[in-house]
Amino acid sequence: MPTTPATSAHEPKRQRGHLRVAAIMEAGVAVFTEKGYDAATMTEIAARSDTAIGSLYRFFPSKEVLADALLVNYAQHVTERFVALAARAPAMTLDVLADALVDFMVSLQSQRSFAIALLDARGGSDERRVKFRQAMRDGLAGVLRTVIPAMTKAKSETMAVVLLHLLKGVSAFAGEKPAARRLLQAEIRQLVRVYLLSAQMDAGT
């Protein structure tokens, strides 16, 4: 009786297994980034992570499964960063929050570009894009309500969409010279501050 190929990653049970999976995923990011998804091979990923090919396939039965695991890992990382930001938010002024949001997007820049490229290579699943986008919006909306408690849920969700589109501009500056990039980021920071201040005034706080 034929067996059905595994379609999901194998969760390691021991610390050694977790370390091995981390090494494989790190190598996966490097090889997918350098070669592109289509040209990347599991053999090269195994070699890059110093993993026996049999062990690689035991944890990740196919290249597709590894790619999907990397996308899930990215989404979890973004969610965790928003949770951490929300925890710090009550002690933040609007100026500090504006800087934190821009810094947050700058820190995610390379990972976000990698995730988008991988999504496109995997067929650009609209459902997955929607989930990623919604996770970003929900996380940012939660931060906004923490900093401006009087803000309504509807207002925070609308502002989150606007802010994310504004913050995406940070990635457009990647090719600029360092001095120009700093000036452009400073403009984004100021725009975010003004927008947040306007929202705070509208909320009556």
Image: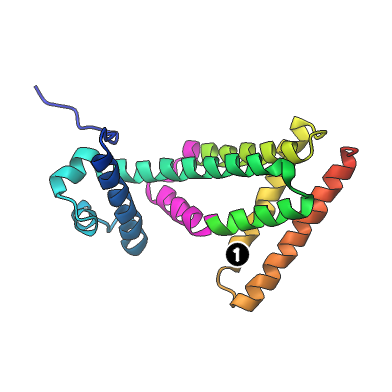
Can you tell which quarter of the image residue 136 is in? top right
Residue 202 vertical position relative to residue 28 in the rendered view, above or below: above
Q: State the image coordinates of residue 195 (x, y, percent, origin top left).
A: 80, 51
Q: Quadrant of the N terminus?
A: top left
Q: Quadrant of the C terminus?
A: top right
- Badge 1 crowding class, 10 Å Cα cut-off, few under 14, some 14 to 19, many 20 or more, is few
Instruction: Report whether 179 appears left or right of 152.
Output: left
Q: Is residue 36 visible?
A: no
Q: Which residues are magenta?
A: 108-128
Magenta-drawn stretch, dominant element (helix, strand or loop) = helix
Look at the image and say whether residue 110 sits in the magenta stretch: yes
Going 73% across and 54% down the picture, which residue do you hit? 96
Q: Secondary structure at mark 1?
A: helix
Going 43% across and 48% down the picture, which residue do you hit? 119
Q: State the image coordinates of residue 97 (x, y, percent, origin top left).
A: 72, 51
Q: State the image coordinates of residue 190 (x, y, percent, origin top left).
A: 77, 61
Going 18% across and 51% down the picture, which residue do you hit? 51
Most foreground residue, 66 or 82? 82
Instruction: Report whether 199 appears left or right of 186.
Output: right
Q: Residue furthest top?
A: 1
Instruction: Report whether 198 appears left or right of 48.
Output: right
Q: Is residue 156 visible?
A: yes
* Residue for badge 1: 172
Q: State the image coordinates of residue 13 (x, y, percent, origin top left).
A: 26, 32
Going 70% across and 57% down the picture, which residue do you hit? 99
Look at the image and say whether residue 194 sits in the magenta stretch: no
Q: Amino acid at mark 1?
A: Ala
Can you tell which quarter of the image residue 192 is in? bottom right
